[in-house]
Every structure is written in structure tokens, then in C-alpha cells.
Image (cartoon, rainbow, N blue to C red):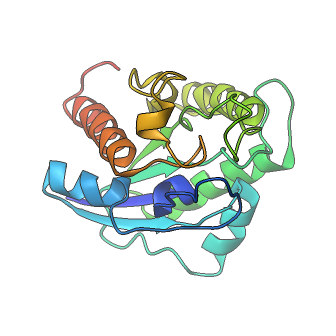
């Protein structure tokens, strides 16, 4: 099985830097890395730090993502804002365009949307402030999966990602994961994907 992971810094594997923001500390031990171990699959990481759906659409259309021979496409975007589950936005439109391109370029692949994960609301963390836009993105992705008839892995419901667990899961800035967080994210996505591929309701 070949899996392509499309997303932002939480896909690329940014660990964050304690007390700072906007400094990508990308490490190899990201969620696609752990996912490959859990599923014994080839997992391609196409995450890009700081990208919105609109940034990612431009990146995709420039030929930076190959979906050749891919069986599953995981899309986890929205943390960097622009989405709204109640009103149309450019990011919403660009997200839809990206999904339509994935369908066109990999007609036999299963496309799975993932909601963005928990973000801190604790002002002591340097990346506090993302939570309101993440909440809107979660609503949008849930609605989109339903409207478009696509499978959903609701990462926002991962029970380990909570305010109380931020020091363990998102220790540096309250947004990006550490090794424990990324391995937990990979396990949650692996379980969700296995359920989807086995035809089980999520």
C-alpha cells in the first residue's frame, strides 16, 4: 500500500521551538514516518510548514506532489486558517479544488479527509492563538466530508489530545507535536484508516 500525506507543518513534522513561533524545527520522526511503521506501508510525506489550503493548492498545481500509484491520500489542512463551516471563503474553495485535482490525478485512490488536531488556548504557549481558526476548520472539514461523500478521520476527537496533555503531546509551543504526539497521531490515523479500509463505520 502507498499512502500520500498532504498537509501543513503537522504533516511535515515541525516539533516547534520552545518559547518561539514561526521557526520550523522539522524532524524525520513525523506522523507519516510512524504511520509507515504501523501499517508497513510506503508513506510519502508532502507536508509543508505554514501552508493554508490556498498555499497548498498552488504548491500542488506546480507539480510538487506525485500521486502516481498511490492507494490512499490523506489530507490534513486547516490549522493555518482561512476556513469557515458556515460561510464560503477562498480557502474553502481552494480546498475543494485541491480535492478535485486529487480525484482527477489519482482516480483509483481513496481520499480521506482529516480534521486538524487540538491547538492550545493557553496563553503561556508561544503558539497560542490558533484554536479559534482550528475550530472553524474542523467544522468545515467535517461538513465537507459529509457533503462530498468522502471518508473522514476526525483527528480533533483524538482522546489523547487535550489541554491537560499539552505538556506531553505538544510540549514546545502548544501547537506542534513532539515525538510522543506524532506517534500518537499516527496511531489514531492508522486505526481510523484500517477501519475505513475494512468498511467499518467511524
Could you tell me residue 145's position as x and y percent? 55, 31
- The residue nearer to you, when weighing 110 against 163, is 163
Quarter holding residue 64 = bottom right
Residue positioned 37% across, 40% down in the render: 185
Could you tell me residue 99's position as x and y percent? 58, 52
- The residue nearer to you, when weighing 42 against 145, is 42
Q: In this view, does 150 lie above or below 9?
A: above
- Residue most toward the bottom? 63
Judge from the rendering whether residue 72 lies leftward or rightward of residue 96; answer left or right: left
Judge from the rendering whether residue 156 lies leftward or rightward of residue 192; answer left or right: right
Judge from the rendering whether residue 202 lies leftward or rightward of residue 47; answer left or right: left
Residue 108 seen by the camera = no
Judge from the rendering whether residue 182 lies leftward or rightward of residue 59; answer left or right: left
Q: In this view, does 160 lie above or below 4?
A: above
- Residue most toward the left? 40
Q: How many labels does the image show?
A: 0
Residue 187 seen by the camera = yes
- The residue nearer to you, when weighing 104 against 123, is 123
Residue positioned 26% across, 52% down in the render: 35
Residue positioned 36% across, 73% down in the render: 68
Q: Is residue 58 above or below residue 106?
A: below
Could you tell me residue 12's position as x and y percent? 48, 63
Quadrant location of the N terminus in the rendered image: bottom left
Quadrant location of the C terminus in the rendered image: top left
Could you tell me residue 38's position as x and y percent? 17, 48
- The residue nearer to you, when weighing 164 against 194, is 164
Amino acid at each position: 500500500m502507498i499512502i500520500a500525506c498532504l498537509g501543513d507543518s503537522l504533516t511535515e513534522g515541525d516539533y516547534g521551538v520552545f518559547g518561539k513561533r514561526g521557526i520550523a524545527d522539522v524532524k524525520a520522526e513525523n506522523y507519516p514516518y510512524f504511520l509507515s511503521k504501523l501499517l508497513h506501508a510506503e508513506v510519502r510525506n508532502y507536508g509543508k510548514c505554514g501552508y493554508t489550503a490556498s498555499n497548498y493548492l498552488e504548491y500542488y498545481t506546480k507539480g510538487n506532489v506525485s500521486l502516481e500509484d498511490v492507494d490512499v491520500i490523506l489530507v490534513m489542512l486547516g490549522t493555518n486558517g482561512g476556513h469557515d463551516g458556515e460561510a464560503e471563503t477562498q480557502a474553502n474553495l481552494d480546498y475543494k479544488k485541491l480535492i478535485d485535482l486529487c480525484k482527477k490525478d489519482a482516480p483509483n485512490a481513496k481520499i480521506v479527509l482529516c480534521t486538524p488536531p487540538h491547538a492550545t488556548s493557553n496563553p503561556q504557549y508561544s503558539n497560542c492563538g490558533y484554536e479559534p481558526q482550528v475550530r472553524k476548520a474542523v467544522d468545515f472539514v467535517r461538513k465537507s466530508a459529509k457533503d462530498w461523500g468522502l471518508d473522514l478521520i476526525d483527528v480533533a476527537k483524538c482522546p489523547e489530545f487535550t489541554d491537560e496533555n499539552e505538556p506531553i503531546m505538544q510540549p514546545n509551543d502548544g501547537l506542534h507535536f513532539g515525538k510522543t504526539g506524532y506517534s500518537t497521531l499516527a496511531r489514531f490515523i492508522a486505526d481510523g484508516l484500517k477501519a475505513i479500509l475494512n468498511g467499518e463505520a467511524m
